[in-house]
Image (spheres, rainbow, N blue to C red):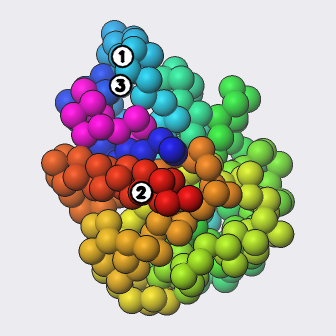
Amino acid sequence: MNRIGCHLSTSKGLHKTIEQCLKINADTFQFFPRNPRGSKSRLIPKKEIEDFLELRNIYNINDIVCHGAYTMNLCSDREDLRELAIRLINEDMKKIHDMNIDKYVIHPGSHKEQGIEKGLDLIIRGLNQIDVSNGQQICIETMSGKGTEVGSDLEEVAFIVNNTKIPLYVCIDTCHLFSSGVRLETSDEYLDEFDKLIGIDKIKVIHCNDSMMPYGANKDRHEKFGKGLIGESKLLNVIFSNRLKGRSIILETPNDLNGYKMEIEEIRGKFNELRNNK
Ligand SMILES: [Zn+2]
């Protein structure tokens, strides 16, 4: 099945994440390379990175996803903040290269009151200044559409991916899809549209979150797997779609480590059930 894991803290050290993965039976995970609500970033000692790389190899924890800070806004109405976002992403690109990680998820941004066209233009201009020459894969995330957030509409995501000069990829988030008004009774309709506008191969990461907020509410509140308004069967439609084989599934549900362990076990169990019923 797809690799599965959750968002983990690196506050006790990058190498400690591997121990955590083993505890919860995850074979991948996601983390923030810097304070998610600020711009500060810890200088990770070389030894810590070496330990991390060694443990990753031994235990086969791979397709790890790095998530950029929430505060970065490539389409801010302030030039200094746009430049800060570009600088931080470029710094993160170097960091993840040292960690032998290629997937980097970012939120496209919020255009404030500048309008969607200006927002899209600024995002593309910003992304064009990112150095991905070491093969890093930037994945823009599909958003719920709160406030002036860009990326809740598939056409906006397509416009960014198809007009940026660097290769660009996509992270789909089930909670964000649902709250932005995507029906998940079957994932095929959405994936057909995605394939037509962007190409299904561009999807590299799946954020698997249930939603506290109702369908189409344009609000981003994650709920535990199967405990929210999306529900288990619709979540499974997306994450186990045959067309999304091989993508890392990352849980960003409100859980402690033990809660994640239970969710991962449950999802693995469902996968085996579905496979045996075929
Ligand atoms: Zn995100």
Q: Position of residue 147 (x, y in %)?
A: 48, 83
Element at label 2: helix
The residue pinned by badge 1 equals 55
Q: Is residue 23 magenta?
A: yes
The residue pinned by badge 3 equals 43
Q: Position of residue 16 (x, y in %)?
A: 25, 26
Say how many tags the image has: 3
Left or right side of 189 for 230: left
Element at label 3: loop
In this rendering, the label closer to the viewer, 2 or 3: 2
Left or right side of 3 for 152: right
Q: Position of residue 246 (x, y in %)?
A: 60, 44
Q: Compared to 152, does 81 lie above or below?
A: above
Element at label 1: helix
Residue depicted at 45% across the width and 69% down the height: 235
The residue pinned by badge 2 equals 273
Ranked by sequence position, the earlier of labels 2 and 3 is 3
Instruction: Please state which amino acid type lies under the numbered disc 2.
Output: Glu
Residue depicted at 57% across the width and 40% down the height: 103
